[in-house]
Amino acid sequence: MHIFRKLVPVTDKTILIVDDEEDFCHLVKLNLEATNHYKVLTAYNGRDGIDMAIQHQPDLILLDIIMPKMSGTEVADVLRNHESTKGIPIIFVTAIFTRSQVGASEYQIGENYFLFKPITFNQLLREIGAKLG
């Protein structure tokens, strides 16, 4: 008789994706969770993203910049000024500029770190790993 065990993911870190593109969120979530190192939460607007960040205290936030009603920069300002979320690293993932326009696949201005869509999964993993140590 064979006994089958359900494989339980070994999630080390929680990542919150805040992006109004539901397909992008779903694809990134599936790929990150498939590594068995990340639990992934998603929010499709800024207000829900703020609420989820406060409630769940993720280890890292992937944040779109252009969203309806509340921009990613507004969301980041709220999170950075809230006592319980001010230390959570944020990576802006944006299509405002492309890699070719900036000349790189990532860019940092002050404490703001940007990744440019389209992004490869390997690049995303590398950058998440660098931020989370």
Image: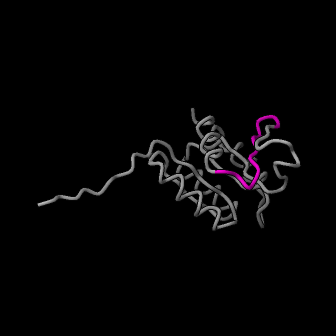
Q: Nearer the viewer, residue 81 or 45?
A: 45
**Residue 112 lies in the magenta-colored region:** yes
Residue 82 picture location, percent across and down:
67, 44
Specify whether 102 is left or right of 91: right
In the image, residue 49 sits, relative to residue 88, either above or below, namely below
The quadrant holding residue 26 is bottom right
Q: Is residue 26 left or right of residue 33?
A: right
Indicate how the structure is coloured in the image: one colour
Query: Residue 54 versus residue 116: which sits nearer the camera?
Result: 116
Q: Position of residue 125 (x, y in %)?
A: 59, 44
For the N terminus, the quadrant is: bottom left
User: At 63% from the left edge and 36% from the top edge, which residue is drawn?
Assistant: 131
The image position of residue 78, as x and y in percent, is 72, 49
Question: For this view, does 50 lie left or right of residue 5?
Answer: right
Q: How many marks?
A: 0
As drawn, the residue found furthest toward the right would be 101
Magenta span of residues: 109-120
Name the residue rendered at 45%, 42% in the picture.
Answer: 12
Q: Nearer the viewer, residue 66 or 82?
A: 66
Q: Residue at x 65, y 55 (%)?
A: 50
* Residue pictured at 68% horizontal, 60% vertical: 19
Of 114 and 42, nearer the camera is 114
Q: Quadrant of the C terminus?
A: top right
Q: Which residue reaches farthest left?
A: 1
Residue 73 image point, x, y percent: 78, 51
